[in-house]
Image (spheres, rainbow, N blue to C red):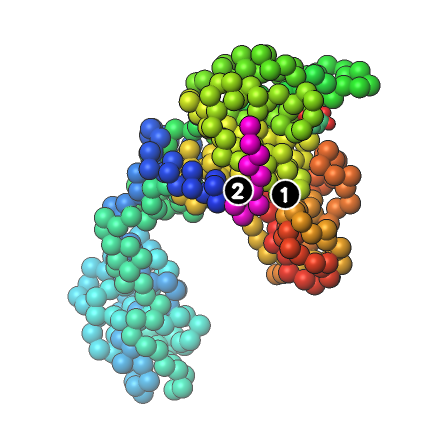
Amino acid sequence: MSDLVLTYAEAANVIRQHAKALLGHMPTAEQVPLLASLNRVLAQPVLADRDQPPFPRSTRDGFACRAKDIGATTPLKVIGQLRAGETWKGSPLEAGQAIEIMTGAPVPSGADCVVMVEHVKLHENFLHFDPAYTIKAGENIVPAGAEAKSGAAIVSAGTRIAASHVAAAAACGYSTVSVYARPRVAILATGDELVPVDQTPLTHQIRNSNSYSLAAQITLAGALPVILPVAPDDPAEIESSIRRAADCDLLLLSGGVSMGKYDFVEQALLALGAEFFFTGAKIQPGRPVVFGRLPQQFFFGLPGNPVSTMVTFLLFTQPLIAALSGEENGGPRFALAQLAHDLPVKPGLTRFLPGRIDFNIHTPQATIIPWQGSGDLASTASANGFVVTPADAGDLSAGDSVSVLLV
Ligand code: AMP
Ligand code: MG
């Protein structure tokens, strides 16, 4: 079969196109308790059930009054007090009057501003102002409906639900929300050398870590991992394992996609009627990555080297899972950081180098972690991002701005 090796940008674009097409066919929806919706994708928008705020809300502790009364030489008379949870029962505020008010209380009619308690002196029920003090009408008041009008969508469908969305839904009276079903993602590790994690490997054997890293990444991506038994490097066995994934929405294979004599994954996929969108990307780690579609589902052939598996998942698989989940604009996620040191760059491939990014400072600083290449899980375990060096980049210097792929 012909080689379809794309640049990183081309491969990312292929994924984006398929993700976009998938968003035209939304998954089924289900109703779940509000807190169970965290990290799920919203299927029905959260609508404001009334104006937000529902009344003109004081944003400060202070005194509600009329802006034009301030600066007059006569002090204002305080005629009452209003706490959050109360509403003013007296007649509308008149010229020369003020009402003591707490944050979150409804501003009484007649008042058009709230003077912060710090700016007044209260003397026997009269408010005195510094002659230089001024305030504009509207200050320290959020008008009714200024944040959202009744019926407006506060959180739109297709949003991955974060804490702020839970808060917005709670404020609008949603004890349950409608979310899309999570896609089921099959994991099929291949390789004669693999043994299960609870088995002691012989010297020449390797524990199957990829089924675990992928299951963890799938879970973080908000989908449901389905781990299949490991398949040996045998085309017929791989074929029959792939058939077992028929009821899943996506199939991830690991290993067996390089140029080696016993790399049979593409052959097995082809025999099952696969269409290939790319069979390699000019990236490191992860060059042999494969993406395509079987009659039942999309699939990725991810390279077996553990760091390649994880990086290609972040770059290509996670955005497709997002689309299968109904999420709009679902990644991958990049941020800018400043290189903490010089970095010689080998051009030709887009590289994703394990890095330690200090995000605790205003301009994040990236330090590359020395590594032995794409099999080096130990280095990746101490990385919290991958520094991107473009295929056409020259050597980089300390202080240069670099893009970082977030994990
Ligand atoms: P492959 O892509 O099959 O050529 O494998 C490349 C490298 O990744 C080899 O060193 C494999 O032993 C290793 N590898 C393959 N699959 C796994 C796995 N499931 N867990 C850990 N390492 C793996
Ligand atoms: Mg292999």
Residue 87's spot in the image, x, y percent? Answer: 25, 57
Q: Quadrant of the N terminus?
A: top right
Residue shown at 35% from the left, 78% from the top = 135
Please tell me whether residue 116 belongs to the stretch shown in magenta.
no
Which is more toward the observer, 262 or 17? 262
Q: Which mark is residue 11?
A: 2
What residue lies at 70% left-to-right and 63% top-to-bottom? 399
Residue 4 belongs to the span the image colors magenta: yes
Snapshot quadrant of residue 162 = top left
Nearest the eye: 77 or 397: 397
Stretch of the chain drawn in magenta: 1-10
Residue 117 x %, y %:
41, 70
Q: Is residue 85 visible in this depiction of the protein?
A: yes
Residue 111 to residue 350: above or below: below
Q: Is residue 379 left or right of residue 10?
A: right
Residue 279 percent location from the top left of the image: 56, 33
Q: Earlier in the sequence, mark 1 or mark 2?
A: 2
Q: Secondary structure at mark 2?
A: helix
Q: Percent position (x, y) of residue 119?
A: 42, 75
Give 2 or 327, whichever is nearer the viewer. Answer: 2
Q: Which is more toward the observer, 64 or 134?
A: 134
> Quadrant location of residue 284?
top right
